[in-house]
Every structure is written in C-alpha cells, then in structure tokens.
Image (cartoon, rainbow, N blue to C red):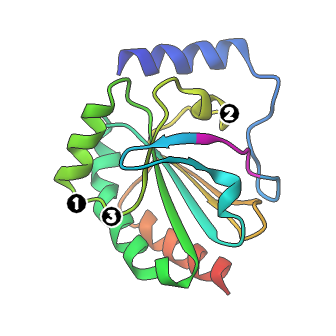
Amino acid sequence: MRALALFITAALALGSAQAAPAPSSPAPDFTLRSMNGPNLRLQEQRGKVVLLNFWATWCAPCREEMPHLNRLYEKYRAAGFVLLGVNVDDDPANALGVAGTFGVKFPMLLDTDKQVSKLYELATMPSTVLIDRDGKVRYLHRGYKPGTELEYDQQIRTLLK
C-alpha cells in the first residue's frame, strides 16, 4: 500500500510526457500477465467493449465493487463484453486471495511494476475505464460509491448497441 502511495505521489510530482487517456482518445495499449493464464494484450480485444478496472487488495471500495463487477461480467460477456481486472498490488498472492474470496469470474491481470497504472495516470483506487469496440476510451470513473455499478451497466449497454 505504501509503495503504491509513493508511486502515485512521485508520478504526480514528476508529471508525465503522455497525457492521461481522455474520452474519444485511443486507449493506451499494454500487455500484462494474467493471474490464471497467458499474457493478455489490450489491443487483441478490439471489436469488443472492454471495462478495465484498476484495483488493489487494500482498497475497501475496490472490495465493495467486486461482486457488482462479477455480475456485470456474467450479464454481458456473451454480448461482446470483456471485463479485465488490473491489480496493482506488489504481491500477486494477495490479489489471488481476494479474487478467490469474491469468486471473481473475469480475467485478472497483474500490474506489479505499475507500468500500466502509470500509462493510465491513476491517482484513485479503484479506477475504471470503459473502451468501445474501436479501442477508444469512452468513459472514465475515478473511485467507487454504491450505485456506480448502475452507471457502468447503462454505459456498457450503450456501447454494446
């Protein structure tokens, strides 16, 4: 937890040569190791609606949101929807434990070196990015509060049309 806080502080203090993704801009591509399988590249998801959810095991709102994300994944995955959890913990075993506790069904990716988090300029946990079928960022959500999952649901339906 402290390492991520230091990372975020340093990233904000130093700035970044690349701007954070904004709606209608191409989603920055990346490849990450999957918790239960091969590496996964974002660009390979073109043609699908993608929800990236950046989370950490120490983040209470992340844990609160997890069951809602599971339901969204189950509801829309047959319609061309992909949900990718991007865990930012230093120790993948922590992420594996929490994912198991919540019975996570969607793919979990490991960003232990925080490179993808830096690419997306994260300053809040959880952070969620919705990407359209053409690979463009359409919606950004920073943080979570009860009811946010209803916004996700509406936005996913809009992008699947």
**Mark 1 belongs to which amino acid?**
Gly
Instruction: Return the residue at label 1.
Output: 103
Residue drawn 29% across the image and 59% down it: 104
Q: Quadrant of the N terminus?
A: top left
Instruction: Return the residue at label 3.
Output: 105
Left or right: 19 as drawn, with respect to 130: right
> How busy is the neighbourhood of tag 1: few (under 14 within 10 Å), some, or many (20 plus)?
few
Residue 119, percent across and down?
Answer: 68, 33
> Residue 152, labelled with which disc?
none
Residue 33, percent across and down?
Answer: 49, 40
Residue drawn 41% across the image and 73% down it: 72
Left or right: 67 as drawn, with respect to 86: left
Residue 44, percent across and down?
Answer: 67, 58
Magenta stretch containing residue 161, yes or no? no
**Mark 3 belongs to which amino acid?**
Lys
Q: Earlier in the sequence, mark 3 or mark 2?
A: 3
> How busy is the neighbourhood of tag 2: few (under 14 within 10 Å), some, or many (20 plus)?
some
Answer with the quarter of the image where residue 120 lies.
top right
Answer with the quarter of the image where residue 51 lies.
bottom right
Q: Say what secondary structure mark 1 lies in.
A: loop
> Residue 119, labelled with which disc?
2
Residue 95 lies, with reference to residue 2, above or below; the image says below
Q: Is disc 3 in contact with disc 2, using a CB cutoff of under 8 Å?
A: no
Q: Earlier in the sequence, mark 1 or mark 2?
A: 1
Q: Which residues are magenta?
A: 27-31
35 or 121: nearer the viewer:
35
Residue 60, percent across and down?
Answer: 28, 42
> How busy is the neighbourhood of tag 3: few (under 14 within 10 Å), some, or many (20 plus)?
some
